[in-house]
């Protein structure tokens, strides 16, 4: 099942892709910044549970501000897996963005 939330240019599009018995994928498109960070974090927290995994697909993210970076650090790593994020996103998540 694919469920796309409303999208306007300059916003963050979040498309929920659910498959029976597997993790839910949230495909992100656009910019992870400002007010959209709270929306994304709310979506993630609503989906995670004791045995529920969420995959965040960053393949079409074009920008992420400091609020987005902080959100990545706040989300529980045991419940959230980032895919297609490239080296920058992996560094933010794995090492807190510090060299």
Image (tube, rainbow, N blue to C red):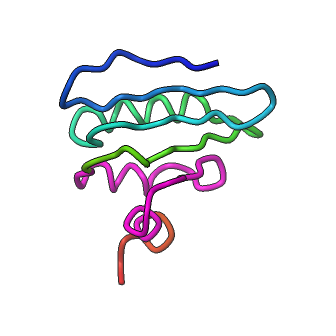
Q: Horizontal and vertical percent for residue 48?
A: 63, 35
Q: Is residue 66 magenta?
A: yes
- 36 or 21: nearer the viewer: 21
Location of residue 75 with respect to 45 vertically, above or below: below
State left or right for residue 17 relative to residue 98: right
Q: Horizontal and vertical percent for residue 53?
A: 68, 41
Location of residue 32 (image quadrant): top left
Tell me the residue at 77%/39% (across/down): 51
Tell me the residue at 54%/26% (across/down): 16
Location of residue 98 with respect to 7 vertically, above or below: below
- 80 or 22: nearer the viewer: 22
State left or right for residue 29 relative to residue 17: left
Location of residue 4 with respect to 14 vertically, above or below: above
State left or right for residue 21 relative to residue 58: right
- 43 or 57: nearer the viewer: 57
- Quarter of the rendering occupied by the N terminus: top right
Q: Horizontal and vertical percent for residue 47?
A: 60, 30
Question: Magenta stretch?
Answer: 64-92
Q: Is residue 83 magenta?
A: yes
Tell me the residue at 24%/42% (across/down): 33
Q: Horizontal and vertical percent for residue 66?
A: 24, 55
The number of callouts visible is 0
Tell me the residue at 54%/53% (across/down): 83
In the image, farthest residue toward the front: 60
- 75 or 62: nearer the viewer: 62
């Amino acid at each position: 099942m694919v469920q796309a939330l409303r999208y306007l240019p300059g916003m963050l599009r979040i498309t929920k892709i659910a498959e029976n018995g597997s993790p839910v994928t949230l495909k992100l498109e656009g910019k992870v910044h400002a007010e959209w960070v709270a929306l994304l974090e709310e979506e993630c927290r609503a989906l995670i549970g004791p045995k529920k995994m969420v995959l965040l697909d960053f393949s079409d993210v074009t920008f992420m501000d400091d609020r987005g970076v902080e959100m990545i650090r706040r989300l529980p790593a045991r419940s959230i897996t980032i895919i297609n994020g490239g080296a920058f996103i992996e560094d933010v998540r794995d090492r807190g963005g510090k060299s």
